[in-house]
Every structure is written in C-alpha cells, then in structure tokens.
Amino acid sequence: MKYLESETFLGDSESAEDAVKSSKLLEVKLQEIRQQLEELDRDSASEQRLSLEIESCYILLDLDRNDEAWQIAKSVFDRALASEHWLAAVEACDVLYQAEKEDGAKALAHGIWLGVTFPIDPELSVAMLQHLIDETPDNSDGAAVAAATACYIVDLRAEGQTQEDLRFFTNQLMGQVARRHSQVEEQEIFDFWVERMELDDPAKFLPRLATVLDVIIDGEWWYDREALRRKIPAEA
C-alpha cells in the first residue's frame, strides 16, 4: 500500500554508511524529477506536473528538507484546488502536515475534509484519518469518529483485494482506538462500545467529524466548502 506504509527510520535498521547511500539515491531521484519538471510548463496544473511535484515533496521530507517540501506542497495545493485535482490537493495537505510546521494540523484537517468529501483513493483518505487518530489523546472521541469514518470510506469506495486489505487495516485501527479510549478488549464489549458511541451510523459520526475539523481549523478555512460541495460528482 502506497500511503499506509510504516515509516522506516534509517538509524534503527541501517548503518551510517547505508543511510548515506540511501540519501544519495534520494538526491539522484529528486534531480531526475526536477529534470522532468523542467520540460513542463512551470505554471501548469496538469495532473502530470502536480504528481511529479508531490513525489518530489515526499523525497524532500525523507531528506529532512521540510521547508522546501512545505513551499512546493502549498503551491501544489493552491493549483490542484483551482483545477479540481482533488487527489493532488489531499496529497499536498499530507505533505504540509508531515512537514511539521505551525499550520500542519490545519493542513491535515483541510486534507481530511477533501478526502472524505471527494471520491479520491480511499487509502489516502484512511492515511489522513490515521494521522488525526495519532494526534488525538487516548480518551478523545475524535479518534473514535475518525476510525469509524475510515471504515466507512473503505466499505463505500474500495473494491476487490484493495478493499480486503484496507478493511483489515481499518478494523485493526478501530480496535486500537477502542482499547485506547475505553480499554475495550473483548468482542462483545467492543460491539457495545461501537453502539454506545454511535459509530455504526454515518449520519451521526460524520457530522461529529466535521465538528472536530472545525475546532482544529478555528475559522481559518482555506477554501469555500459550500462552493466545493457543488462540485462533488453525482456518483460520489
């Protein structure tokens, strides 16, 4: 899975020499991407250009060049939003969050709203919700709501083997949240917890997720949500 791969910390599993080699390989890949970008219109919002820029951002994060990643990702976000490339816009928010800057939490909230609202790659939507879970205290209802939303998105949008893999992941995620939130260990207690928390009804937990995002963003929305809702595909 592309977005849900567990992080690998070079110092934990590789020698210093291996880490240097890995960094050099990343630098080479970054240069290759930048050469490809030189051949494209600098102001373009084409899917190809946005995708290459996002790929470069993830490499910059791996190289701990977070300031550069933030600057590129913010530009990608603005252009992707204007051109209705929703996947690239959410990927940009993911980079902005991982860059660990002051507005990172707001970027995450913006990405979650887009990733839940528009029918993008469900794995990315789940990854954004997992970030939110990681950010919340153990006893937070927000983590439970995020986990329920992740399960819902997988059931709604994923298909085939991808759905099976993501369903396993999100079910595990829900179980972890239940243990964190209420020390739930047994299936019967878990089922009762889900019912008590109203996590089995999207009509109830989705508005609660919206409230969580509103609190994080604190009135500083980067886009007009009502205008974007009018652009939701009919089949979404």
Image (tube, helix red, strand yellow):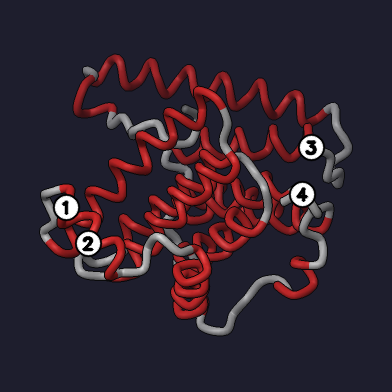
- Alpha carbon separation for disc pair 1 and 2: 6 Å
Left or right: 215 with respect to 30?
left
Marks 4 and 2 close (CB-CB < 8 Å): no
| Image mark for residue 192 | 2
Instruction: Tell me the amino acid under the disc marked 1.
Output: Glu
Q: Secondary structure at mark 4?
A: loop
Marks 2 and 3 close (CB-CB < 8 Å): no
The residue to which callout 4 is attached is 235
Image quadrant in which you'd find residue 6: top left
Q: Which of marks 1 and 3 precedes in the sequence?
A: 3
Marks 1 and 4 close (CB-CB < 8 Å): no
Marks 1 and 2 close (CB-CB < 8 Å): yes
Q: Which of marks 4 and 3 precedes in the sequence?
A: 3
Q: Which of marks 3 and 2 precedes in the sequence?
A: 3
The residue to which callout 1 is attached is 188
Picture coordinates of residue 96 (x, y %)? 53, 54
Question: How many other residues sit within 10 Å of disc 2, few (<14), some (14-19) or many (≥20)?
Answer: few
